[in-house]
Image (tube, helix red, strand yellow):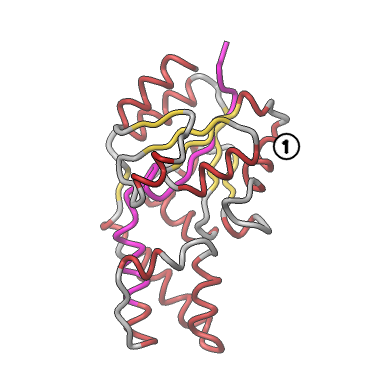
Amino acid sequence: MHNFDGIIFDVDGTLTSTNDLIFETFRYISRKYLNKNPSNDEIMSLFGPTEEVILKEWSGNNFETVKNDYFNFYSDNHYMAELYPGIKEILDFIKSKNVLLSIFTGKGREAASITLKKLDIFNYFDLIITGDDVIEHKPSAEGINKFIDKFNLAKEKVLMIGDAPSDIKAARSAGVKIATVVWDSYVKKEVINLGSDYIFREVNDLKGFLEKNL
C-alpha cells in the first residue's frame, strides 16, 4: 500500500537547476530596457508573481515586446539550466508505482512549459499548475488543493516537495505532508528552521525515502 497516492513537485531549485538562467534573463531585460543591472538578491525579492506580472510592471505599454524578448532569451539560453542528477530516475520510479504526479510552481505557464519540455520531463506530470492557473500564488494552498480536488485524493496521502518557505507554508495550509530539499536552496537556513516533515540534502536521499514509501 502506498503511503502517498499523489506527489507535487516545485520546479526551480527542486527538480531543475534554473536559478542562474532566471537571474540572467531578468538581468538581460533590465539592462536592455531599464538601464539597470540588478543583483541576484534584488531579482529574488521580485519572486512571487509570475514573470509576466513582473515584466508588466517594468514595461508598461512596451509589455508585448519586453515579454517576447524575455521568453526568447530564456528559451535560447536554456543550456544554462539542467535537471539535478538523479531526478529523472525518481520520476520514472514514481510513475512505475502508478502514483499521481503534479507540478505546482510560481513560474508562469510559458516559462514552466519551456523548462519542463527543454529538460524532457513535461510528460511525466498528470497535472501542471503554474502561477497563471491560480488566483493566489504560494504560500497560498490553492494549487495544492486543485490537485487534491481534481483526483479526489486524501490529504494525508499527498506529499509536496519543494525548496522554499512558500512551499512549506502552502503545504501546511493545505494539510499535506511537506518534504523540503536543500541541495540548491537559496534560503537553506530559513527552510530548515521552519521544520518540514522531511528534509533531504541529496537527491539520493529523496530517492531512498520514496522507494520505502511508495
Residue drawn 38% across the image and 52% down it: 118
Residue in front for this viewpoint, 190 or 136: 190
Give the side of residue 63 with respect to residue 30, left or right. right
Classify 207 as above or below 20: above
Magenta stretch in the rendered image: 1-28
Asked whether residue 17 is drawn in magenta, I would say yes
Residue in front for this viewpoint, 212 or 42: 42
Q: Residue furthest top?
A: 1
Residue drawn 56% across the image and 44% down it: 169
Which residue is label 1 attached to?
Answer: 149
Q: Where, by quadrant of the figure, is residue 144 drawn?
A: top right
Q: Look at the image and tell me in which quarter the N terminus lies.
A: top right
Give the side of residue 72 with respect to residue 175, left or right. left
Give the side of residue 165 with respect to residue 202, left or right. right
- Please count the marks in the image: 1
Residue drawn 55% across the image and 30% down it: 177
Q: Amino acid at mark 1?
A: Asp
